[in-house]
Structure formats: structure tokens, C-alpha cells
Image (tube, rainbow, N blue to C red):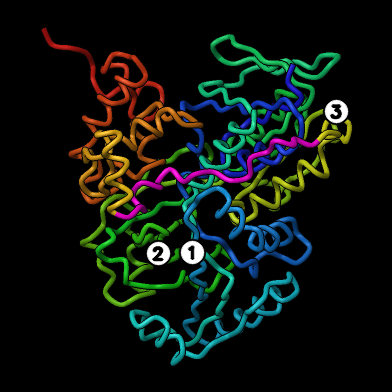
Amino acid sequence: MYDIAVIGGGVVGGAILRELTRYKLKAVLLEKEPDVCMGASKANSGIVHAGFDALPGSNKAIFNVLGNKMMKRYAKDLGVKYKNNGSLVVAFGEKDREKLSELLLRGRKNGVRGLKIISGKKLRRLEPNISENATCALYAKTGGIICPYELTIAAIGNAMDNGANLLTEFNVVKITKTGEGFTITSEDGKSVTAKTIINVAGAGSGEIANLCGDDSVKIGFRRGEYLLLDRESGDLVSHTLFFTPTEKGKGILVSNTVDGNIILGPTAEELGEYDVSTTANGLDSVIEKAKVMVKNPPLYNTITSFAGVRAYAKERHDFIIERSAKVEGLINVCGIESPGLTSAPAIGKFVVEKLIPEELRSERNKGYIKKRKPDYYFGALSARKKNKIIEKNADYGKIVCRCEKITEGEIREIIRKNPQATTVDAVKRRLRAGMGRCQGGFCQPRVAEILSEELNIPLEKVKKSIKGSELLAGKSK
């Protein structure tokens, strides 16, 4: 019997799980995929929003601003790269200028510090590659960038180091209310019991609520498509550039990533069902808008495209963060679309401190480990320190990923580390092996071999990502 079962291994589920381990609680995270961070948390812009966009008093506004203030410390404790690069909402004419004034006032009401409208001349000094048609911009100095999957993996890994359990490939198909709480059953017949369920299942959160007996969570799907440029073009911009939002949304952005790439997107397409396919029309739209925002974007340096689906609350259009009014012991944390990544640390703290019954969190975990060693630590070391490690373990001297200079020793280490990497893409998310210009063309076979060795499974059983994505069909005679 667990005290708490968190369903959903995204950035918010990870933040909640980590906060739970500050207390003497028996907690488990249930994730339907082979790895954590395989939904919206791995396929978004990685922007730490300042908090000027959401309506004052909404959950989005409250948790965005709180999360923004927490993020620098949160990322540092977890060993995650974070950069406070600032953001610019760019105007292209007088109508946009009026909207910026509205956002300025809204942001100040929300408690955002350091907001101001700057002239086109100042904008061009900050961003030399900005379009000549840009007239002014709203500058938000508290805006930032972070790696979303790095943050998710680190939070869950830290929680596991503090005693939480993780069950992957646990696709929940049945939830039965019992006298003590709930019995949660997976597609393959496995089950766990828990006193409390925290439903953070993203696109599947409406279904999970229904399985518990709560039909009030209505979820919609909005697809966003992206292009990623090689780090060779990383000096295109230095801030995160947004279009002035319209009734149709924020439009695409042009931004750095914390690893030095340039990201363009996302689109915003309403879907009837979950679908992360990229489309010619969607990517053409991203290209068209990027050309409006900046002069001569180096699209020849595009190395990949991808799409993510944002799950939003259809009826409320705000974050749902509350105890279920229909099912005792169920906490719904649903519809966490943008700015959900920024809000995650604050949501995690609120859910545990305000929504978990006091009797469950009556005792603090005195041995709580606050900090986590970064997965990328080896690459950041000096040559002298690297050589000392190589002297003890020669695997750290063998380069596997040429683009990102990732070694065999690092790959073996993260396969053994919480949360364990068991697929090629899981290694990629932790170390960037396969994220360079060749997109895994050289390193993928060797990564698969190392996984086979470490997991003690046949090479043909190694998956790229999800169930059914085995790289090899079998062995030839």
C-alpha cells in the first residue's frame, strides 16, 4: 500500500514526486511509456516565462510568477542548465503597440518585475538580426530558458534517490475504489494500491479521472510543430523573441536553447485526438513566421523537426489543481499547458503542502537529499579532471557521440542511474548523444550495443523509444 500514487511522469508529476519525498511518505510514480518525460514535457519550447500573459488571478498567472521566482534555485539544486536570457514580445505596428501596453499592465498586476516597453532602436541594439519592420517590444528581464526533459529527469531521479519508486510501462486501464484507497491496474495486469492518487497524466488526465469516477475533467489537444537549428546558428538571437499575441494565440517564437541551438515554433493546431506527427503545412507556417521575425533565418542549418501536444482544460482554459469534488482521495492536476514548465516547481510545492492530507505528511524526511549531480557533469570538467577519471575507467576516454563528444563511460553511468535509461532516446535525453548535426547517424548503433550489454538483453530487443520501436528485426543466419 503506497501513501501516494502519482500518475504521469512529466515535468509537473516529477516536481510533485520530488516534493513528496521531503516527507516520510511511501510514493510511487506510474508512467505508461518506457521512460519518463515522453509527452508534452519533452516536446516544448523550454521557455521559462516571465508571467505577463495570463489573466490576473488565474492559476496560470499565480503559478507562473511563483515558478519563475523558484526556477533558478530549483535548477541549480537539480544540476540542470538554466539561463536568464530575458524575453522580448515584438510589435509590428500600432495595433501591436497597444497590445504591449495591455500586457505591461497585466504583467505588473501579476507581480512580474522588470517589465518595460523599449523602442525599435533599442530593440535593434539588443537583437541585430530582428526584422526591419519591428517597431518596439515589451522587454521581460525575468524570462529564461531551460531544458525541459533534463529538468523532468533530474526531479524524478532526485525523488528516487530520496526513496520514491518509479514504474514505467505501467499503462493504467482500471482504477477501483477500495476502503483504504485505490487499486490501480495496468494493461498487462500488474497492480498497485494507494491511499491517494495524484492525476498528472497530461493528455490522458481526463481518462484517468474518468477511471476514478470523476467525469468533470475535459481535455482538449493542441499540436505545436517545431524546427531546430544546429548550434552553428546559435548567435542568430540572444533573447527569446515572441510575436505580439492575438486572439489565435502567441504565435511562434525564435529562441536559443540552453545547449546553444535555435528553436523555431510552435504552431497551434486544434486536434480531435492525440497526434504528434509533423506536417508540411505546419512546418511551412513556422518557416514563414520566422522570416517575418528575423532577417534571413539560417534554415539551411535545420537538423530536425518535431511536434508536441499541449493538453488543455476545455471548459476552464486554466490549470486544474484541486481535490476532486466527486472522488475522495483523488487530486487532479490537469490541463497544465503553457506556462506549465515554468509553473512546475510552484505547482509541486502547492499540491504537497496544500492538497495532501496533513496526516499523510506529518513527519519530515530528515535524510532528504536536496541536490543532484548533473548527468552532463563529465563534459563540463577540465581536461585534468577528465584525465583522472579516464585513468580509473578507460570507458570515459572512448567517444561514442562525435557531435556532442559523449563518452562510453557517461552512457554506462546514466543507464545505471535513477531514473534508469533503457532506450536509445532515453540516453539521448540525458546526455544529448544523437542530438547533434548527424542526429545519431554515427552513434546510435554503439549506444544500442551498450544498452544491450548493460541491460543484459539481446540487441534486437533494444528499443529506440516506445514499445514496438526495436531497432533490429532479428539476426541473419
Amino acid under disc 1:
Lys
Q: Is residue 227 left or right of residue 303?
A: right
Instruction: Give residue 83's mark.
Output: 1
Residue 372 belongs to magenta span = yes
Quadrant assignment for the C terminus: top left
Residue 255: quarter of image = bottom left
Amino acid under disc 2:
Asn
Q: Residues within 10 Å of mark 1 (few under 14, many from 20)?
A: some
Above or below: residue 258 compared with residue 98: above
CA gap between label 2 and label 1 equals 10 Å
Q: Secondary structure under badge 3?
A: loop
Instruction: Give residue 256's mark.
Output: 2
**Residue drawn 19% across and 39% down?**
441
User: Magenta residues: mostly which secondary structure?
Assistant: loop
Quadrant assignment for the N terminus: top right
Q: At which x and y percent is residue 452? A: 30, 20
**Residue drawn 35% across and 39% down?**
428
Residue that mark 3 sits on: 328
CA gap between label 3 and label 2 equals 44 Å
Disc with the residue nearer the chain's start (2 vs 1): 1
